[in-house]
Amino acid sequence: MSAAWKRAWRDVGNAQPPQAYPDPRGEAHLRSAVADLLGRARGLHTDADSIVITTGSMHGMSLSLPVLGQGLSASPPVLAHENPGYHVATSTARRWGWSIHDVAVDGDGLVTAELDRAPNRTRAVYVTPSHQYPTGGLLTVGRRRELADFARSRDIMIVEDDYDSEFRYDVAPLPTVAEFAPDRTIYLGTVAKTLGGGIRIGWLVAPPNIVEQIAELRIDLGDYPSLPVQHAMTSLLRDGEWDRTVRAARRLYRERDRRVAAALERFGELRGVGAGMHTTLLLDPKVATSVALEVAAAGVDVETLARSTRSISPVAGLIVGYGSVSDDELNYALDMLVDALTQLT
């Protein structure tokens, strides 16, 4: 446990218990610290008034969708969604009464040329441009501009989930979609991939009118992040602990990214190499299912792309994550995968 972590919680413990109801946007000092972080780490120029503190990316999505879906009472709003795409985002949208319109992805992420097929009731596009989940594509600058142009032409919003942009190993991150269309983007961030999912802190950046509506919704829901956790997070950001943690994690995951690629590259096309905390191995769907079942019998849990695929897609394969495991566990998993792939491919 780091000295900064202990100091953050010692400061929280010495503070007076909060008496008033919290600001529905989140604590002002934390929002200011997040604005500084986004400007420094992502080149996203914003301010505290455009930020809402959440408990994570999907919480931010849950706060945004009811606001974006207003005014379509006769029929459900539609979310244009990457296919394959993040299955938790799919279930979150459906839970709030949204329908899903699938948009194909390729090696460069969302195929923006296919957005023109989205129905008239489309109110938002959900996208993971920094490291498409689950196929790993990096959305090109050209496609980011096309996505921004589409949102403006159709008067809809982009929901940009920037869930693991801290982890790029070969090249610098591209500008956020929000930089191309700040008036048309709700940007989602989280500490889950850096400080751990148990911290339950994230943020969203949105235009002022949407921030105001989200704040009003949150007053009704009463789902505020813990004030002590917000105060501790502010301390961790301001004394540099976040930056130190990211640098250490980046070194670890860079080595793991290379290790996974070296072990699996001979079995098929790899996507997502050089970024994030997972690599995708493209395979025939039947082979992918057989390999996943084979390694599951040895205690290794590897998802197939089928779980994240809603309609027909030309891509199938295995999602090999290397974030929440020890080095020994990763070595064992890779040994089991190599054995199974050698037998079945």
Image (cartoon, rainbow, N blue to C red):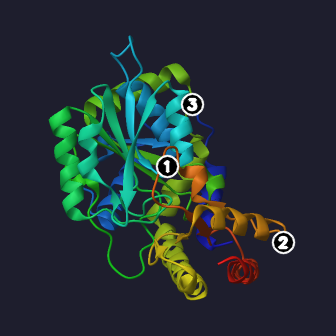
What residue is pinned by disc 3? Answer: 223
The residue drawn where x is 53% and y is 78% is 268
Q: For the residue labelled by badge 2, is the local secondary structure a helix, a strand or a loop? A: loop
- Rendering coords of residue 192 (x, y %): 57, 57
Q: Marks 3 and 2: in contact by CB < 8 Å?
A: no
What residue is pinned by disc 2? Answer: 298
Assess disc 2: are there few (<14), some (14-19) or many (≥20) residues with their C-alpha within 10 Å of its C-alpha: few
Q: Marks 2 and 1: in contact by CB < 8 Å?
A: no
What residue is pinned by disc 1? Answer: 202
Disc 1 marks which amino acid? Gly
Image position of 189 with respect to 297: above or below: above
Determine which quarter of the picture holds residue 260: bottom right
Disc 3 marks which amino acid? Asp
- Rendering coords of residue 300 (x, y %): 77, 69
Image position of 234 (left or right of 307):
left
| Distance from the alpha carbon under mark 1 to that under mark 3 | 13 Å
Disc 2 marks which amino acid? Ala
Q: For the residue labelled by badge 1, is the local secondary structure a helix, a strand or a loop? A: strand
Q: Residue furthest top?
A: 74
